Image (tube, rainbow, N blue to C red):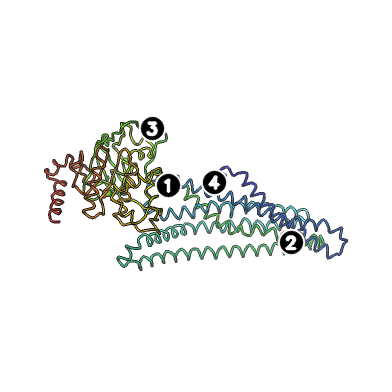
Amino acid sequence: MNVLRLAPGMGRRLLVAVAAGAAAELAAVGLIGAAAWLITRAAQQPSLAALSVAIVAVRAFATTRGLFRYGERLAGHEVALRAQASARERLYEALVPAGPLGRRGADLLSRMVDDTDAVQDLLVRCLLPAAAAAVTAAAAIAVGAFLLPAAALVLLAGLLVAGVVLPACTAAAARRRSTRLAPARAELAAGVADLVHGAADLAAYGATERALEAAARADARLAALERRQTRANAAALALGTLVQGLTVAAIVLVAQAAGIGQVATAVLALTALVSFEPVLPLAAAGERLAGVMAALRRLREIRATPPAVPGPATPAAPPEGPLTVRVDDLVVRHDPALPPALDGVSLTLPPGRRVAVVGPSGAGKSTLLSALMRTADIESGSIRLNDVDVRDLAPDDVRARMTGLTQDPYVFRASLRDNLRLAGPDAGQEELADAVRRARLETWVERTGWDTTLGEDGRTVSGGQLQRLALARALLHDPEILLLDEPAESLDEPTADALMADLLDATRGRTTLLVTHRLRGLEQVDEIIVLESGRVTQRGHHDTLTTTPGYYHDLWTSETLTAGTR
Ligand SMILES: Nc1ncnc2c1ncn2[C@@H]1O[C@H](COP(=O)(O)OP(=O)(O)OP(=O)(O)O)[C@@H](O)[C@H]1O
Ligand SMILES: [Mg+2]
């Protein structure tokens, strides 16, 4: 794997971090070696002049070690944090065109946080320490080879066991466990997300206890796996320390057998001892490396997921002038295993025309709007804007011209004003107030205040208020082709009637596609399309449809009957 691809443009700094890390470890080895020489030599009471070089060396190693360590942390963390930020950015870029995330949200969130952390760990906890350890080990072995080649061989063997064999074992064990750890983590994340977002529904049906127990079980499974992992790590660290002790003891024995003298023996033994310091943590790094590689694989997987609605490689120029939307024989399928949600739908929306779409729940009305907004892909047939197929345009370019109120709007954790401004960043107070008035939301806004925070942790917004807030957004955005999905949903009858009347007034002469369950006022629109099971079963004007047997006639009869009894 190419590390430089993780930290683009940071190659030089990465080198600085490696060099500073190695220098800090070397300074530590030098410090101990020089100190060992100084202490044993001083015990032989030579003249002070004979010790002065070693004294200066000890001081120099002690101070530079701190400086090098500081440099390594600074450069290493800068590279790591930048690499992590760029990994997050690339993940966002991959997710945005993927469209709505649905239930994969919790798992994705954990990938976003944990797996991009892995990029940082790869550099800070695995690669930099391994490079520094390798340099230190090589230097210690060189010192050993200079003093006593046999001792250097012993040291080489000990370092290989602690620095290569043990990390390889921990990495292999972690790889085996990670196939169980990742699903356990994802399961817990999904369970907790359900508990938080579904708290009200769980409480309403007395299901909180059961959901809590399920989450606790997932938590226990994860904890057991993690405990086993921690135990294995501790064992690896203990084994490493044992190898360190045995190696040093063996070196002392070899040195004594060779009779190289006390000073050289002390230097050899202490250099060997300290050369293990950067090598011992590699066992834990090996375990982490397995997790890191799995995380990077998952990130690559997400990035490789084709977006729900792919954009063309080279988008065509958006059409100019007043726009006509032509939908021809459109087929949209959400799930390859299921029948299509839209099956051969055609309609034309010339400039200024208003078309209403009605039909039973699940008929495909929202799917039609999703296809127009390019959040659901087209299986066959076409949608054209002035003869340009929307598949040849950048999805954002399509949405810049054709968008509006979705059925499941979202309130952001932001002020009421900013929640509206989402749809019109440059809108002045006048325009905001106008959109709010047209969405029949002014009383609520006056009561709540423009700067009150809404959304999670903020002021609660009722279903009807949210619907009108979303409608105000759509009106503020004022796209050339306005799409509205059930704008009067979750409102009481009088408000819904008044809102629909206002809306029909406000959209006169504007290209509009309106999905609705309420038929009152629809005599004003140019065409009504009845969708049933993804197919157009009736189309025409209100007056014709009310007198023709079918879904529209039945709905109209029941609506007028209810109105009569009110
Ligand atoms: N993202 C999706 N993934 C899978 N199936 C989906 C998805 N969205 C909608 N469907 C299915 O497609 C069909 C049409 O759904 P759609 O939301 O378009 O209906 P609708 O006419 O808007 O209904 P309602 O009046 O209840 O809003 C339904 O059977 C629905 O279950
Ligand atoms: Mg719908």
- Is the C-beta of the residue carrying label 3 under 8 Å from the nearest atom of ligand 1? no
Decide which of tag 2 and tag 1 comes sooner along the chain: 1
Q: State the separation of the CA atoms marked 4 and 1.
A: 18 Å
Per the image, the residue denoted by label 3 is 316
* Residue for badge 4: 6
How dense is the environment of label 1, judged by Cα within 10 Å: few (below 14), some, or many (20 and up)? Answer: some
Viewer-side residue, 446 vs 158: 446
Image: 517 above or below 316: below
Numbered disc 3: secondary structure: loop
The type of residue carrying mark 1 is Leu
Q: Position of residue 267 (x, y in %)?
A: 77, 60
Gap between marks 2 and 3, in whole Å?
71 Å
Looking at numbered disc 2 in the image, what kind of residue is underneath it?
Leu
* Three-letter amino acid code of the residue under disc 4: Leu
Instruction: Check whether the beta carbons of the residues at disc 1 and disc 3 lie within 8 A of each other.
Output: no
- SS for tag 1? helix
Tell me the residue that label 2 is attached to.
270
> Which sits earlier in the primary sequence, circle 2 or circle 4?
4
What distance separates the C-alpha of mark 1 from that of mark 3?
Answer: 23 Å
Disc 4 residue crowd, few under 14, some 14–19, many 20+, Cα 10 Å: many
Task: Let me know if residue 140 appears in the view.
Answer: no
Query: Residue 420: image x %, image y %?
Result: 37, 48
| Amino acid type, callout 3 | Ala
296 horizontally vs 212: left or right = right
Q: Residue at x 38, y 44 (%)?
A: 428
Q: Which residue is mark 1?
A: 95
Instruction: Tell me how far mark 2 sits from mark 1, CA to CA.
Output: 53 Å
**In 3D space, how far apart are the residues under numbered discs 4 and 3 (Cα atoms)?**
33 Å
Q: Nearer the viewer, mark 2 or mark 4?
A: 4
In three-dimensional space, the C-alpha distance between marks 2 and 4, rounded to whole angstroms, equals: 38 Å
